[in-house]
Image (spheres, helix red, strand yellow):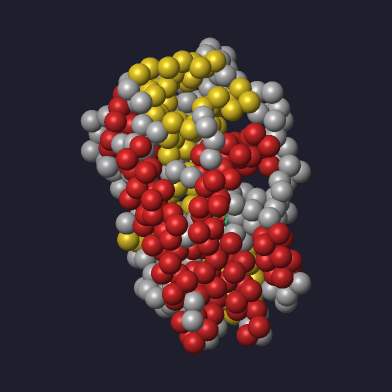
Amino acid sequence: MSERYDLLIVGAGPAGLAAALAAAPSGARIAVLDDNPAPGGQIWRDGPQAHLPAAARRLRAAVENSPVQLLTGTRVVAAPGGKRLLLEDAERGWRVRYDKLILCTGARERLLPFPGWTLPGVTGAGGLQALIKGGLPVAGERLVIAGSGPLLLASAASAKAAGAHLLRIAEQAPLAALARFAAHLPRWPGKVWQAGRLFDGRYRASSHVLAALGDERLEGVRLWQNGRVVELACERLACGFGLIPNIQLAQALGCAIREDAVAVDRWQATGLADHFAAGECTGFGGSEKALVEGAIAGHAAVGEEGQARRLFPRRRRWQAFAERLARDFVLDPRLKTLATPDTLVCRCEDVPYGALAGRDGWTDAKLNSRCGMGACQGRVCGAAAQFLFGWQPPQPRPPLSPTRIDTLLCLEESD
Ligand SMILES: Cc1cc2nc3c(=O)[nH]c(=O)nc-3n(C[C@H](O)[C@H](O)[C@H](O)COP(=O)(O)OP(=O)(O)OC[C@H]3O[C@@H](n4cnc5c(N)ncnc54)[C@H](O)[C@@H]3O)c2cc1C
């Protein structure tokens, strides 16, 4: 027998929590599920070394004290159709039915291949932050952060607070773009304060990683730093080249995709009846955008259009910030030339760049090399190949992530 909800929300980050809180007073039977052990999403990820801001703790507590059911440690692994989802947690697999669905699946960071990027000691920038929040000790370690976007500064702040010795933050965007971004920031006064708090004198524009150096593990980093090559000895390198929306579940459901994000209208409704989307799966842009979009989706899903409409001006303001981010942190095409023929692009299946260059697209690459067919199901190499070769990732197929056989068998049960 499937469990049934009036409203199901996938993702308990800022967007999902705001959607739940907006919809809760309607009296609808609501559940929010998330594959992490605690609600909060990426920005408010909990853990032994995490320090959640007061606003995040308040939002979380409000949802926890509401009638909304929180299903943590729970993943959506398939969307068999007919307003049903297949879920899995540590103990069981089961199906749920819903009347309305809000997708708040967030974004992940884009990792790009460069020589040495698979050495132990090299992680994503947001990845390092998540590891630190989860308890990874980094005190005394020399750290270089490279890539693009404000997440580099947030990651550096977490690492410094945990005692890491930050050597450099290498931002690929040129100084002119950063100056433009800074000049527009006063439109969002909170962001000026945030930028001032996070800024670090070791930040350099027009700089990017060339190679991670070392045999068994990371020993140093070679950087292109504003026109010259620089080498720094270090124990950790954290690289993230912006964020990409998590759209696999939306694609599996049949929602329309626009510019690599879930397409929504002013009610945050996707083209698919009774299916809404909010937050970074509709385009990256920060937690403020996610919060207001989530609230609009929550109200709209329970028919409170007036309350949703009142939030439109706030959403416009934060969507303008998202547009600024996208414009000023656009990736330099030179980053496409970092990988050498033997640099791995798909680390799950050990597929090097040389085996992919010259292929026709994803299907050709998969058939000839198994690229994208490993445990991450192309989440990492798919985004890299899209940037490197311009290949559109294919429609995802179930299961959306590695799943137990017992769980898949639930698909055969009758309702
Ligand atoms: C690694 C990382 C670190 C970041 N750190 C910061 C930071 O320090 N400061 C900052 O301002 N911004 C940060 N961001 C940006 C941040 O994503 C947003 O500002 C904000 O968290 C977006 O909120 P959201 O609700 O849209 O998505 P998210 O916060 O990403 O929440 C989405 C949630 O959905 C869950 N989910 C996705 N698919 C499934 C599924 N199939 N089944 C179950 N659950 C699913 C995810 O695990 C996640 O918990 C970070 C982003 C990333 C990728």
Decide which of 138, 269 is in the foreground and name it.
138
| Residue 183 point in image, percent of width and height | 38, 51
| Residue 157 point in image, percent of width and height | 61, 39
Decide which of 254, 303 is in the foreground and name it.
303
The mark tally for this picture is 0
The answer to whether any part of residue 289 appears in the image is yes
| Residue 357 point in image, percent of width and height | 27, 29
Residue drawn at (23%, 38%), measured in percent from left and top? 360
The answer to whether 122 is drawn above or below residue 405 in the figure is: above
Residue drawn at (65%, 28%), measured in percent from left and top? 164
Left or right? Give the position of 146 relative to 410.
left
Residue drawn at (37%, 74%), measured in percent from left and top? 265
The answer to whether 202 is drawn above or below residue 364 in the figure is: above
| Residue 253 point in image, percent of width and height | 43, 65
Q: Residue furthest top?
A: 215
Quadrant that contains the C terminus: bottom right
Quadrant that contains the N terminus: bottom right
Left or right? Give the position of 12 relative to 303.
right
Residue drawn at (48%, 85%), measured in percent from left and top? 305
The answer to whether any part of residue 2 appears in the image is no
Decide which of 19, 158 is in the foreground and name it.
158
The answer to whether 216 is drawn above or below residue 114 in the figure is: above
